[in-house]
């Protein structure tokens, strides 16, 4: 009897988890011929799967990363998987503000269109510092995309209707921002949560500012992804995590579905500034919907990346 119950429970869980994963499907078949897409990252994981899917739809796709060799290898794979030759690689370091400025200058010189910007690239929970002295999580996950997006806005306006997709995580709900210490870099997980919350606020204020120009913006939680992050741990730990992630985490291809959905579907237009998961809008917790905080973060971020000339001492980068 116990064996039978165990088997039935295991079968039920397997089928239920399979059903949960099957919900993450972008069913919109829209083509993107003549459109240009920029995906920060795009060389592995969810970013690469997104690049393959959008290249298959006819878009010209640019991907970025810091490692040129890795980038060129990813381009070859994306071309092979998508049967498209319209894929390009550009070197970009989101942890260096000058690298972002250089990239934008060269991109705008070389490419006349930008229809879809996907801010995917980011770093996991770690304690480190960017080249400009900001905490790595906040600098790469928020400040880098913030500056990049602002420098590319004119081209997005010119190509309107266009859209911006910011990839975040639902882990944002476990922290709040502290404006006396935006450069917080003490507990890795908390630092990461705050950077993901910043993505949400950034998206909301961005949508308010650019909607009149024909640009839509949304934030995406792609899901918890099976990845290679356990490779630095012991064999036993990797085995345990492999079993756990295989059951409850999703593949990069499945995780890319909501990103693809937000890049192509017109259904998102009625939820400008919204937060999406499983190819549908999700309601945020009250503290993540504060438009006053979103505006305050925008103004602080402008100062931190040098888009304004009114420095605030309490937001200054760490002296290295």
Image (spheres, helix red, strand yellow):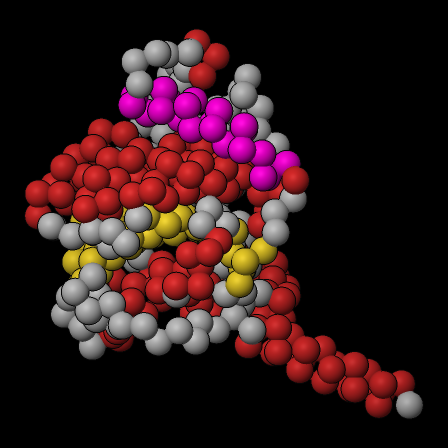
Up the image or down, 175 lies above or below 181; here it is below
* Residue interval drawn in magenta: 287-307
**Looking at this rendering, what residue extends furthest in the front direction?**
212
- Residue 20 on image: x %, y %: 61, 73
**Residue under the point 45% across and 33% down:** 138
- Residue 223 on image: x %, y %: 54, 60
- Name the magenta segment's main secondary structure: helix
Work out whether residue 235 or residue 59 is closer to the camera in this orientation and state it: 59
Q: Assign the N terminus to one quadrant of the image.
A: bottom right
Up the image or down, 101 lies above or below 35; here it is above
Does the magenta segment cover residue 82?
Answer: no
Number of numbered tags placed on the structure image: 0
Is residue 218 left or right of 223 when viewed as pictured? left
**Looking at this rendering, what residue extends furthest in the left direction?**
110
Is residue 106 left or right of 266 when viewed as pictured? left
Is residue 199 left or right of 154 when viewed as pictured? right
**Residue under the point 36% across and 24% down:** 302
Is residue 205 left or right of 19 when viewed as pictured? left
- Residue 38 on image: x %, y %: 25, 53
Q: Quadrant of residue 122?
A: top left
Q: Quadrant of residue 109?
A: top left
For residue 305, say whether it is visible. yes
**Residue under the point 35% across and 11% down:** 310
Q: Assign the C terminus to one quadrant of the image.
A: top left
For residue 242, say whether it is visible. no
Work out whether residue 77 or residue 293 is closer to the camera in this orientation and state it: 293
Does the magenta segment cover residue 294?
Answer: yes
**Residue under the point 78% across and 86% down:** 7
- Residue 131 on image: x %, y %: 31, 27
**Looking at this rendering, what residue extends furthest in the right direction?**
1
Work out whether residue 17 or residue 68 is closer to the camera in this orientation and state it: 17
């Amino acid at each position: 009897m116990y064996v039978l119950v165990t088997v039935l429970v295991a079968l039920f869980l397997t089928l239920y988890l399979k059903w949960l994963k099957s919900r993450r499907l972008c069913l919109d078949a829209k083509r993107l011929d003549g459109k240009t897409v920029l995906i920060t990252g795009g060389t592995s994981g969810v970013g690469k799967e997104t690049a393959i899917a959008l290249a298959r739809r006819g878009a010209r796709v640019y991907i970025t990363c810091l490692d040129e060799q890795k980038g060129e290898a990813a381009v070859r794979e994306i071309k092979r998987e998508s049967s498209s030759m319209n894929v390009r690689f550009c070197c970009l370091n989101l942890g260096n503000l000058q690298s972002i400025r250089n990239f934008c200058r060269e991109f705008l010189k070389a490419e006349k269109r930008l229809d879809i910007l996907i801010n995917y690239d980011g770093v996991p929970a770690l304690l480190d510092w960017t080249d400009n002295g900001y905490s790595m999580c906040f600098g790469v996950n928020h400040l880098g995309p913030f500056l990049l997006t602002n420098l590319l806005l004119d081209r997005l306006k010119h190509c309107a209707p266009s859209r911006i997709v910011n990839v975040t995580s639902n882990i944002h709900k476990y922290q709040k921002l502290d404006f006396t210490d935006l450069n917080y870099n003490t507990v890795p997980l908390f630092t990461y949560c705050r950077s993901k919350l910043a993505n949400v606020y950034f998206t909301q204020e961005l949508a308010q500012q650019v909607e009149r120009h024909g640009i839509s913006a949304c934030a995406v939680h792609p899901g918890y992804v099976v990845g290679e992050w356990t490779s630095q741990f012991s064999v036993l730990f990797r085995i345990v995590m492999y079993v756990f992630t295989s059951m409850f985490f999703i593949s990069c291809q499945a995780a890319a579905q909501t990103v693809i959905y937000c890049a192509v579907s017109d259904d998102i237009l009625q939820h400008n500034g919204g937060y999406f998961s499983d190819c549908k809008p999700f309601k945020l917790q009250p503290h993540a919907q504060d438009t006053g905080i979103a505006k305050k973060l925008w103004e602080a971020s402008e100062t931190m990346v040098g888009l304004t000339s009114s420095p605030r001492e309490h937001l200054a980068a760490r002296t290295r």
